[in-house]
Image (cartoon, grey):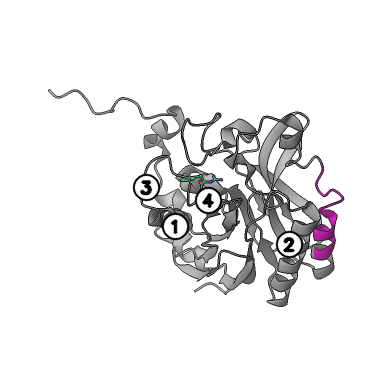
Amino acid sequence: MSAAKKLRLAVAQLGPVQRADTRAQVVRRLVDLLHEAHGRGARWVTFPELALTTFFPRWSLEDPAEVRSFFETEMPGPATRPLFDAARAKGIGFYLGYAELDGETQYNTSILVGPDGRIIGKYRKIHIPGDASSREGAALQHLEKKYFAVGDLGFPVWDTPDAAIGMCICNDRRWPETFRVMGLQGVDVVMVGYNTPSGYVQWNEPIHLRMHHHLLSLQSAAYQNACWIAAAAKAGVEEGSPMIGGSCIVAPAGEIMVRAFSEDDEVINYMCDLSVSGHYRANIFNFAAHRRPEHYRPIVERTGAGAPLGAAPP
Ligand code: ING
């Protein structure tokens, strides 16, 4: 068995952020959670998607000024600098999800910030779920396509002194391609924030399946790509709209090693042995030995499902 390579990760779940909550109020909570994570001995902490604001894509907002009020034009900015300062003071790295305005383009973004408080990398959400305009008669909307452009940075992995770290955001976790692209870069740890409504349904899906699919996606991805996954929810009832918790840290074996209990601000942490990935990469998921890309062409060539490839019956 290769020598253990221990790295303590933390996940900082956020409870609800209401529409009137200021950046300062939210950053105060983030700093408190970061201190809690540091107190547990964590080296990295994952915060949720869109951590600085309420999940505004639940509404069809028509006032451009109000829409822009949810976006950051600089990172760190005056309101978020206290989080960077706290992280540098404690020597702890973090993942932060937020709404990014880049010129005139709006992205659903996450950044990876090192223990020295410097931004290592940026990711922009690629799988944008929901609709571009309101659904008639829907009790709740999910309008991320209205507010966010498709990310233009791919799924990069960054080699840090601690581990090879990748990022994705919420709906990305439901698409195996997300993690396989990072798996093909040798990712050790994927950090993912999410805001998953438990009231929003495009059909009358039994609501317990929302948590089931969340965990199923993460456990499959961790196992099939021999990586650790740290997943942070923004949870609880925001403006009357419920969102699931279920923040967790998943091992390369696909097991959930620790999971949040509440739907509020809560820190979980786990001492991850990164060397565990090596066993899966050397055997069952030895990509170089077992993958056959020459047979995977439809995955890249097709966007939607197309005609079956089977030959016509004789
Ligand atoms: N949220 C949801 C998610 O992928 C969603 C979108 C809602 C998917 C309901 C399935 C069912 O977890 C975000 N922000 O992507």
* Residue at 53% in and 64% down: 248
Are the residues at dot 3 and dot 4 in contact (C-beta closer than 8 Å)?
no
Image-quadrant location for residue 122? top right
Q: Is mark 1 within 8 Å of ligand 1?
A: no
Q: CA distance from mark 1 to mark 2?
A: 24 Å
Q: How many marks?
A: 4
- Which x, y percent locates residue 225? 48, 54
Q: CA distance from mark 1 to mark 3?
A: 12 Å
Figure check: 204 above or below 299: below
Q: Is mark 4 within 8 Å of ligand 1?
A: yes
Q: CA distance from mark 1 to mark 4?
A: 9 Å
| Of the image marks 2 and 4, the number of the one nearer the N terminus | 2
| Of the image marks 1 and 3, the number of the one nearer the N terminus | 3
* Residue at 41% in and 46% down: 291
Element carrying mark 3: loop
Q: Is mark 3 within 8 Å of ligand 1?
A: yes
Q: Quick one: 259 or 274, which is closer to the camera?
A: 259
Are the residues at dot 3 and dot 2 in contact (C-beta closer than 8 Å)?
no
Q: CA distance from mark 2 to mark 4?
A: 19 Å
Q: Which residues are magenta?
A: 74-86
| Of the image marks 3 and 4, the number of the one nearer the N terminus | 4
- Which x, y percent locates residue 19? 69, 48
In the rendered image, which residue does mark 4 sit on? 196
Figure check: 225 above or below 248: above
In the rendered image, which residue does mark 1 sit on? 211
Residue 30 circle label: 2
Q: Is residue 112 left or right of residue 145?
A: right
Neighbourhood count class around disc 2 (C-alpha, 10 Å): few under 14, some 14–19, many 20 upward = many
| Of the image marks 1 and 2, the number of the one nearer the N terminus | 2
Is residue 300 in the magenta section? Answer: no
Are the residues at dot 1 and dot 4 in contact (C-beta closer than 8 Å)?
no
Image-quadrant location for residue 72? top right
